Amino acid sequence: RSAMTAAAVHAHAPLLATASESAHIKVFDLKGSQISCIRYQNSFLGSRIASVGCLAFHPYSGMLVTGSVEPASVSVYTATETH
């Protein structure tokens, strides 16, 4: 329920990604069903997701790129299938 900081729509796949102030990145299909959620995991090896300022999908693959200002960083997430 926190404010949205960025959004992106995939050019060829029916996907929409949003980022929020609460450090959550959510991926939806175009019908509004949530497909995935990337969020901060509090663990020894986990790293905090910074406040995302921009999102972009790779035009032909299942990759999502995020950009943050504080700290300055770029993250790349790829789609994986689970069976």
Image: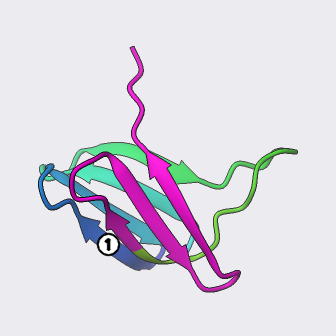
In the depicted structure, whether residue 61 falls above or below residue 81 = below
Does residue 49 appear left or right of residue 20 in this picture? right
User: Badge 1, how many Cα within 10 Å: few under 14, some, many 20+?
Assistant: some
* Place of residue 44 in the rendered image (x, y in percent of width and height, measured from the top left): 87, 45
Q: Amino acid at mark 1?
A: Ala
Does residue 74 appear left or right of residue 61 in this picture? right
Mark 1 sits on what residue?
Answer: 7
Answer whether residue 68 is magenta in the image: yes
| Residue most extreme to the bottom | 69
* Place of residue 81 in the rendered image (x, y in percent of width and height, measured from the top left): 38, 26
Q: Nearer the viewer, residue 78 or 29?
A: 78
SS at mark 1 in the image: strand
Q: Which residues are magenta?
A: 55-83
Looking at the image, which residue is at 82% across and 45% down? 45
* Place of residue 64 in the rendered image (x, y in percent of width and height, measured from the top left): 39, 57
Answer whether residue 65 is magenta in the image: yes
Looking at the image, which residue is at 48% across and 68% down? 66
* Place of residue 6 in the rendered image (x, y in percent of width and height, measured from the top left): 38, 77
| Residue most extreme to the right | 44
